Amino acid sequence: MSERDEAGAVRSWYTRFADHYEAGGADSYARIARAVAGDEELVGLVLTLPGGNKRQPNLLLGAVRFLGGPVREWAAFRAWTVEHWAAVRAVVLERMTQTNEVRRCAALMPVLATLEGPLGLVEVGSSAGLCLYPDRYAYSYDGGAPVGDSPLVLECATSGGVPLPGRVVEVAWRAGVDLNPLDAADEGDVRWLEALVWPGAHERERRERLRAAASLVAAQGPAPVVAGDLVETVAELVGRVPSGVTPVVFGGAVLTYLPLAERERFARVVRGLPGHWVSLEGWRVLPWLEGARPAEPTHLTVAVDERVVGWAGEHGQSLAWA
């Protein structure tokens, strides 16, 4: 690809990102991403990064935040990023976008409760493993009394007859895989996860929830997350699930980072494994699913064994049953 074509691809990526974040309510990110797309110098700096996911908008914005740079207004962001580009570039090369939105467990719990337990959870794209512990959190659906006993209560609004769980599911075994596992007990790793939280109306709430979940997971000891490629490692992890325990492969908005051919290969691998596959992905990510498109474009399609059962708010704040 020529440099001109690469520049065009970067501009297109940042413009699409801006469209998405406007829909998601992160207006400052949308403004900055759209301005980057129209700025020759910033596009040129992005082009000095390796191709692929190292050029993604979320990673650049997260790196600036991680270093204490401004991400509210374009003029301040531009000036600071240009001046501190060497430091920003170093963080981008070291880190990855690997958010841990623990509230997605609230959308996951009603689905897990429909499966025969006890469960053996295998999470792909685990990051710091916060979503590997759905049994360590409590849940309040539609403002009701919490299900489960935990200092962290995850709230979720439901519609369409969601089968609300009467108790937290039993998890007998758990493991995850990530290209770069993070440690919930490591202050730097937790700060990086905080840097990936969208700015906006619910930013403080999300950061507090992230901190609380990280503290709970850190108290369990090191999360059982191995370093590896999710396509190559998932079968091995499912093979470790003890006898009498139902394997459940799951992930939240992670397959979107794989090319379509790799997503298709992952699906072929998981189809051949025992147990179940629970996916929470954007509706375009698994294009072969029937009826995947949600009413809200930013919502995630929830499927069990490639059968659509509902749609979740991107941060797990809602769940609509199909």
Image (cartoon, rainbow, N blue to C red):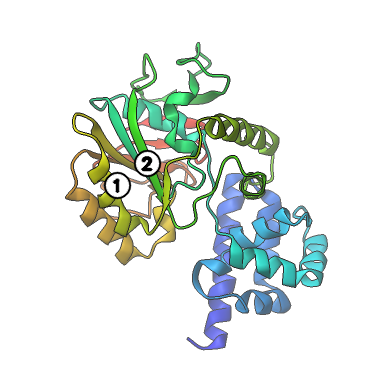
The extreme top residue here reads 145
Front residue of this view, candidates 73 and 269: 269
Seen at 29% across and 30% down, the residue is 119
| Residue 167 shown left or right of residue 21 in the figure | left
Residue 124 visible to an observer of this rendering = no
State the image coordinates of residue 131 (x, y, percent, origin top left): 46, 37
Residue 315 visible to an observer of this rendering = yes
- Which image quadrant: the C terminus? top left
Front residue of this view, candidates 309 and 135: 135
SS at circle 1: helix
| Residue 47 shown left or right of residue 248 in the figure | right
Q: Is residue 134 above or below residue 263?
A: above
Quadrant housing residue 73: bottom right
CA–CA distance in space, label 2 to label 1: 7 Å
Seen at 65% across and 47% down, the residue is 26
Quadrant housing residue 319: top left
Disc 2 crowd, CA 10 A, few/some/many (<14, 14-19, 20+): many
Seen at 76% across and 67% down, the residue is 81
Q: Are marks 2 and 1 in contact (CB under 8 Å)?
A: yes
State the image coordinates of residue 152 (x, y, percent, origin top left): 57, 23
Task: Say what amino acid the circle numbered 1 marks.
Answer: Leu
SS at circle 2: strand
Tell me the number on the disc at residue 237. 1
